[in-house]
Amino acid sequence: MGLNKDSTGLHAIDLGLIIKKTHDTDKVIALGGNPNVGKSTVFNELTGLRQHTGNWPGKTVTNAQGYCNYNQNGYVIVDLPGCYSLMAHSVEEEVARDFICFSDADAVIIVCDATCLERSLNLVLQTLEITSSVVVCVNLMDEAKKKKIKINLQALSEKLGVPVVGTAARSSKGLDLLMDAVTQVIENAQQSPFKIQYPDYIENAVSILEPDVKCVCEDTVDSRWLSLMLLHWDQNMHGFIDQNLKSNFIADESIALVLNDVRDNLEHQGITQRQIKDDIVSSIVHTAEELCEDTVLFNHKNYKNKDSKIDNILTGKWTAFPIMILALLGVFWLTITGSNYPSKIISDFLFWIQDQLLTFFRWINAPEVLYEMLVLGIYRVLAWVVSVMLPPMAIFFPLFTLLEDVGFLPRIAFNLDKCFKKCCACGKQALTMCMGFGCNAAGVIGCRIIDSPRERLIAIITNNFVPCNGRFPILIAIISMFFVGAAGGGASILSAVLLTAVIVLGILMTFITSKFLSKTILKGVPSSFTLELPPYRKPQIRKVIIHSVFDRTLFVLGRAVCVAAPAGLIIWLMANIFIGDRTLLLHCSGFLDPFARLLGMDGVILLAFILGFPANEVVIPIMIMAYMAEGSIIDIENLSILKELLVENGWTWITAVSVMLFSLMHWPCSTTCLTIKKETQSLKWTIISVLVPTVMGIVICFVFSSVARLIGGR
Amino acid sequence: MQEIRKLSELEQGKRAMVLNIDSEDNMRRRLQDLGLIKGTEVTCIQKSPLGDPIAFLIRGAVIALRCEDSSCVQIQSREV
């Protein structure tokens, strides 16, 4: 269902995982599976929570847990990041593997994609080597049915030796059966799951190793599996085994001795480490292939045809870029047109309430300072945030979520990858940028899908060039006030075009900065990666719209109370506390003014950006408040007077463009900074992430305003 | 006997069989995880608008690879 209030802002910060049981008898269930098979949807359906879901691989980057009550039993369900294998080549895989191996989970559910079962089975087979308490959940049965794929679940279950349950989590089908199977597995722990048959030389080596391994590790881990792991030795396995078994396993002499023996023996036969690894992987892949041959029936050989046709258009040579621009334009146009109307109604209503409040306070003879502070300070900023910022935020969000659900985002990454490669960055950065439209903090977290640390840092630092949900209403407001005349059909299209141009500029800045970073402080060559293009899925339009409009509204209202109200108070106090013959506000804005003028803005605007550090939504409301405290316009009944207020305070088109440029490029908000600190574990990179966009913004605003003034401004 | 080529040279819509993967360890494992091993059948599905990366159908899933990476995979064409 897209990003929501639990996956954006402060909630996005990963605090690690501590299992929270409500009763001692609660069972812990791990939920694993390949990326993008609907794990999070299954999780949400079971727990009633709303984890971020969307149609692209890698959304779930942290462990999430939820509680599920079924037949009077309590279950703690842990949603693991998606992975293809448990051999741990990436952080997500490590997280998933460590949890399955060492967390004492009572059962593991592996979610599979019914439309791509063979690949999902790789993970199932690997999991079965570690634990026998596995339930296989074949999800997306509804899609498989549409694609005329038939799966014999019964036969598969018999072959694997563990329960196999078909589900369609999006429509909540089969989940009861799934929980029944889980209960059954927990109760009768003795299952005899399918084991993979490896080539003889590996089986021999394992049988030599296993007795000694069993001696040392006892019953903590499956000894056959650990022997196999030792055999295809890996540097990162080393630390992991020692760390988790809490004994000096690798250093144990008997093990080292046997292992050396086995290795020498294999080397003697001319078998290299690489061949062992290759043979282990091939055995797994071939086993999955065989299992599927007997249980999966494709009635329709060209079941990918329809997706292929859509791809031909969305990623076609001549159509891809125009369509991406058009999609952006369309989304903005809908947002701008859609938000005009509610915006007006809300502001009329809220300012009517303001008048009533004032009348009320005067009627009860409240002290003037008190009610002016409450109503003209706190309430008014709140009202501005809700009326100007909320409508575009609440409309853009579900639209963006729909694109995410359909599966459009990975195609954007596919189209743009070559540009990222030229900047020595990763194509998946396009996905994290898209997340940034929703919330930069979520975008920064999302950068975990990028494996190379260097490329991940680039993506984190440049994420701020994408205006988040809280910033682009600023752009919309300014565009509609200064560059587009009276409202009308043509006007909103023009607004959307201008907004798109600003966003494209942000994207260009991302490329330029990425390239710059790759050539200076983050030197390196582009690394390899694989990008999966998932099948298109029909979005659940009604559900998305209801959930995310509701969610966004609550989120913005909550933030408005937490951030905008104190900001309103501060600005009111500043405007009413006199130091000498001038207010504190004038002192501050006066102090910032000379510098801000260089950037084409004025002191008040810069002050608003500084006070907007906790949340960018309050920037425009603060500006309005500050101007109103000083100027002659005391009451604004509707938005059309807003421009008058700004013009009266010396705004020209140069100011407007400078403000837009600056809002596109300045320091990240406080939450994003915290997230960056958390994700990079480094103060240095956090400071760089603040400096890079800020310096860019200052330079560009300075150059722009100087040139514009020379050419013909004033 | 068909000639041996690189995966990156496979034409759109054509199928081929993997003969050998020459990538370094990291990429090699990633491809193996996706089920791309010796003998796997791949189909070139779609080239991106700028020509690179290219999307391949590998065991039922569509995976995009950059040319540097797909050129490390040797293939033998198959008639469709």
Image (cartoon, rainbow, N blue to C red):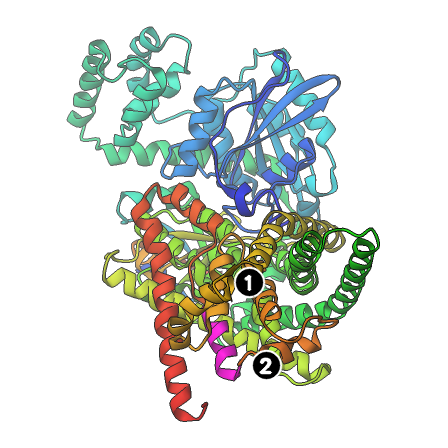
> Which residue type does callout 1 highlight?
Val
Subunit of label 1 = A
- Count the marks: 2
- Label placed on residue A648: 2
**Figure quadrant of residue A520:** bottom left
- Label placed on residue A619: 1
Q: Nearer the viewer, residue A180 or A696?
A: A696
Kindly report the distance in space between the C-alpha atoms of the residues bearing marks 1 and 2.
19 Å
Whether labels 1 and 2 belong to a single chain: the reply is: yes
Magenta-tinted stretch: A651-662
Majority secondary structure in the magenta region: helix
Q: Does residue A533 appear to the left or right of A135 in the view shown?
A: left
Q: Does residue A464 appear to the left or right of A106 in the view shown?
A: left
Q: Nearer the viewer, residue A608 or B39?
A: A608
**Label 1 neighbourhood size at 10 Å, few (<14), some (14-19), many (20+)?**
many
- Magenta segment includes A661: yes
